[in-house]
Image (spheres, rainbow, N blue to C red):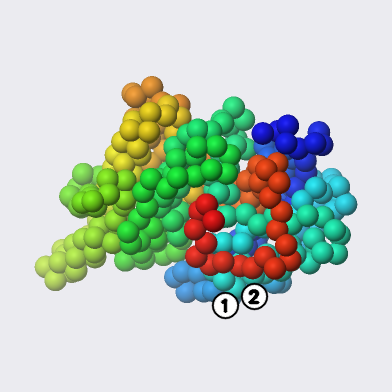
Amino acid sequence: MDKACNKEDITILAIESSCDETAAAVVRNGREVLSNIISSQIDLHTIYGGVVPEIASRKHIERINQVIGEALQTAGTELREMDAIAVTYGPGLVGALLVGVSAAKAISFASGIPLIGVHHIEGHISANYIENQELEPPFVCLVVSGGHSHLVRVSDYGEYEILGRTRDDAAGEAFDKVARAIGLGYPGGPKIDKVSKDGNPDAIQFPRAKVADAVYDFSFSGLKSAVLNYLNSCEMKGIEICQADVAASFQKAVVDVLVEHSMQAVRECGINKFAIAGGVASNTALRSALEEECAKAGIAFYHPSPVMCTDNAAMIGAAAYYEYCKGVRHGYDLNAVPNLRLGE
Ligand code: KG4
Ligand code: ZN
């Protein structure tokens, strides 16, 4: 793969703005992060209980130039040293994506440095290359974030086969909705993770949904409804709920399903390497359950550190490097594609 690049070092400026983080990074050879600047908007959206797309777009516009400048400066590099400008072009919020795509196109056009559009999920998967220097495909990857729940077979760099996906809510979405219902607020995932440590995961038996005709697919909306029904029935009976027990029992139900499907996929693919990615991959219960199951099964388990699990631009720079080596370049007609599918 590396031989396809005829230069010794490939340095990429990467930009990410698909949701509520304005981010830019400088990454060398797909694995070495020279800078990774993340300007989070979480505080702004918290008062609304979730991401407000119009506010996200506006904040991206206000911050993007500064974030890009900071990424170059922190890396000790200059724009002219870049071999490519990479940007997330989907999936995500269209207005948010457009800010990053427009900035990347403008920089590329003005400087003559090639442009590479990157799939956001490919970025999440590639975060594993940064912190697991020895990891190479093939491996199976569970991508679980606020917008996605996918089980992916990574056959080679940039080559993906979707084994399973959610039929309704993404895992992170379920965390966020349940957190709101039990009064924890946004963003729900980290809060449920924390509160669950004081709760009993076996206190309430929530359902573990299976999708009849697709063993690797997920469904979390039934679980979310079961939690809401439980809360309603407690309220009607005048029973005070134990927030920590509800959080821990809900989290256990999600983790059980994610672990079971992942381990089955790894076994059936005959691959002994397994990785996780996306915001929910920073969940401590999920990480320890997968660590334990992989150890039992003799499977090597890879996971990025929490900051590399949630949205960042370094992961986009890592993914872009392998696209660059394959000769992928985009034209100035590159557009934001809110529902971009992996492999397109
Ligand atoms: O990957 P990400 O930053 O953005 C998307 O691409 O969606 O993921 C954000 C999601 C949110 O739903 C958030 O609640 C969830 O990841 N999340 C967590 C944890 N940290 C973030 N979910 C469970 N446990 C966590 N520790
Ligand atoms: Zn993401």
Q: Residues within 10 Å of mark 1 (few under 14, many from 20)?
A: few
Corner quadrant of residue 329: bottom right
Outermost residue, bottom side: 54
| Residue denoted by label 2 | 58
Numbered badge on residue 240:
none
The vertical placement of 59 against 85, above or below, is: below
Corner quadrant of residue 174: bottom left
Q: Residue 75: where, in percent of width, then height?
A: 79, 45
Element class at badge 1: helix
Q: 204 or 296: which is nearer to us? A: 296
> Which residue is pictured at 62% across the width and 38% down the height?
130
Q: Residue 339: where, in percent of width, then height?
A: 50, 65
Residue contact at pointers 1 and 2, CB within 8 angstroms: yes
> Which residue is pictured at 66% across the width and 46% down the height?
323
The quarter of the image holding the C terminus is bottom right
> Which residue is pictured at 67% across the width and 69% down the height?
99
Report the side of 130 relative to 339 (left or right). right
Q: Amino acid at mark 1?
A: Glu
| Residue denoted by label 1 | 54
Is the CB of the residue bearing disc 1 within 8 angstroms of ligand 1?
no
Q: 269 or 229: which is nearer to us? A: 269
The quarter of the image holding the N terminus is top right
> Which residue is pictured at 61% across the width and 62% down the height?
89
